[in-house]
Image: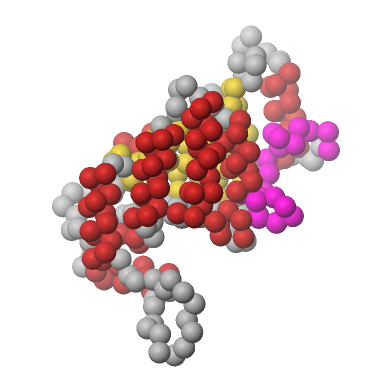
Amino acid sequence: MTETESSPKRDLLLEAITSGFVSGNPNADNLLIPMLIANRDGLTMEEALKSELKQCKSFDMSVAFIGNEELKCLKQYFLNFDRRNLRRSGRIITSTYNFFNTPDAFRTLLQIQENANIKVYIWQADEPNHSSSSIANYRYHPKGYVFRHQDGEGTELDSTYIGSSNLTSTALRENKEWNLKVSSRTNSGLAQQVNGEIDHQIQESVRLDGDWLKRYEEQYERYAPKRPTTPIQSNDQPIRPNSMQTEALMNLVSL
């Protein structure tokens, strides 16, 4: 059957897309309708990611910031994904931007890579001769998640989430966020654009390994702004920069 011919899955997708972008249809498939996820009314990005990881055959996550707490929460889902998929085609791309990602987070990512066979990449700016402190200025800021599915008839569908949530507990559960979910055929124009961008990001990245983590720990200890670990209890506590001040400080460090 060619792409122009009708099939039940294709018709359902067309109906859902029309409902989402043209005229709402209460009979359209809720799993295929474009959807805004804003972490309210019981619909959170964390629940969406867990549901996708239970069903997908492969995935890519391209996120600037990753929290160690959230990685531990999702770790079993990554392990279960690996057990279901012999292809082991899960990839995570992240960054060193502003030294937000802690060595502990990268250490957990390394464990996931080793135990769940999920490849982890760190994006590097495509510029030569960086000083050791300037990795914090590699301006990688995406928040995208792609999950690929295949039904019993061999029909391939992608669920793509593009929006504002990083892979942190607050961003996936609590913060007011806007994440748009769109379903598409794997050979659609949108899927080709997204996959092309992911491939480009990976070409500009390095694989996470023990040697890289050791170097990052050294740079993190030397250059990363100190962050409070407990709520401020008195006026005697040292002043810590907020996120905007942190970014400004890191830009000064690299000069």
Which of the pair 238/40 is nearer the observer?
Answer: 238
Q: In the visual, does 71 lie left or right of 43?
A: left
Q: In the visual, does 172 lie left or right of 63?
A: right
Q: Is residue 36 magenta?
A: yes
**Colouring chosen for the image of the structure:** secondary structure
Q: Does the magenta stretch include residue 114?
A: no
Q: In which quarter of the view is residue 204 placed?
A: top left
Which of the pair 100/202 is nearer the observer?
Answer: 100
Which of the pair 168/140 is nearer the observer?
Answer: 168
Above-or-below relation of 244 to 131: below
Q: Which residue lies furthest to the left in this view?
A: 129
Q: Where is residue 247 drawn, in percent x and y?
A: 36, 68
Task: Identify the image quadrant of the N terminus.
Answer: top right
Q: Where is residue 62 drawn, in percent x and y?
A: 45, 44
At horizontal 40% and vertical 45% (from top left) the residue drawn is 109
Which of the pair 179/66 is nearer the observer?
Answer: 66
Q: Where is residue 209 drawn, in percent x and y?
A: 28, 41
At horizontal 34% and vertical 55% (from top left) the residue drawn is 103
Q: In which quarter of the view is residue 198 placed?
A: top left
Regarding residue 5, the answer to whether it shows in the image is: yes
Regarding residue 134, the answer to whether it shows in the image is: no
Q: In the visual, does 11 lie left or right of 78?
A: right
Q: In the visual, does 217 lie left or right of 196?
A: left
Task: Identify the image quadrant of the C terminus.
Answer: bottom left
At horizontal 37% and vertical 55% (from top left) the residue drawn is 104
Residue range highlighted in magenta: 26-45
Q: Which residue lies furthest to the bottom in this view?
A: 235
Q: Where is residue 74 drawn, in percent x and y?
A: 53, 45
At horizontal 40% and vertical 53% (from top left) the residue drawn is 105
